[in-house]
Amino acid sequence: MAGYMSSKKTMEINPENAIMDELRKRADADKNDKSVNDLVLLLFETALLTSGFSLDEPNTFGNRIHRMLKLGLSIDEDGGVAEADIPPLEDPEADAEGSKMEEVD
């Protein structure tokens, strides 16, 4: 019964939008441009997130955003802060018992 109730999702793209126009120009200039590919995928994944969907691979989304930030800030892949300098995230399971957050009913 639920199969009859769900509708197919459609993403509409305005081809006259300035973003789409620039992406089309850059894709036509170089079909193998990784930054254009990343931007198109970011546009799609952002549309998914804003529509309430979840991403299958959120780490890939995060990595793509970091690459675009580096590109926008003109930071070389080798330059900037090394990943070894960034402290690791805390393990949520390791701190489950001694959580500093107060539980709310």
Image: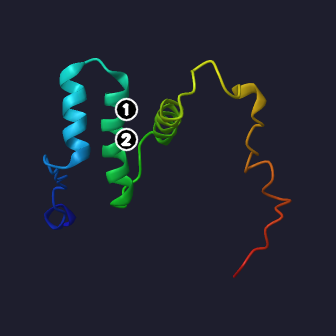
Residue displayed at 24% across by 18% down: 30
Distance Cα–Cα, label 2 vs label 1: 6 Å
Q: Is residue 8 left or right of residue 89?
A: left
Q: In which image quadrant can residue 102 be found?
A: bottom right
Query: Residue 41: where, in percent of width, then height?
Result: 33, 37
Q: Nearer the viewer, residue 101 or 83?
A: 83
Q: In which image quadrant can residue 38 be found?
A: top left
Q: Nearer the viewer, residue 47 or 55?
A: 47
Whether 105 is drawn above or below 9: the answer is below
- Furthest-right residue in view? 98
Whether 29 is drawn above or below 39: the answer is above
Query: Residue 66: where, in percent of width, then height?
Result: 53, 35
Q: Which residue lies under the disc numbered 2?
A: 42
Q: Is residue 20 left or right of residue 76?
A: left
| Number of residues whose C-alpha sits closer than 10 Å to that of mark 2, classed few (under 14), some (14–19) or many (20 or more) | some
Q: Dot 2: what SS?
A: helix
Q: Dot 1: what SS?
A: helix
Q: Quadrant of the N terminus?
A: bottom left
Residue displayed at 67% across by 27% down: 80
Q: Is residue 11 left or right of residue 89?
A: left
Question: Which amino acid is tagged 2?
Answer: Leu
Question: Which amino acid is tagged 1?
Answer: Asp
Q: Quadrant of the C terminus?
A: bottom right
| Number of residues whose C-alpha sits closer than 10 Å to that of mark 1, classed few (under 14), some (14–19) or many (20 or more) | some
Q: Which residue lies under the disc numbered 1?
A: 38
Q: Is residue 3 left or right of residue 82?
A: left
Discs 2, 1 touching: Cβ within 8 Å:
yes
Residue displayed at 54% across by 34% down: 73
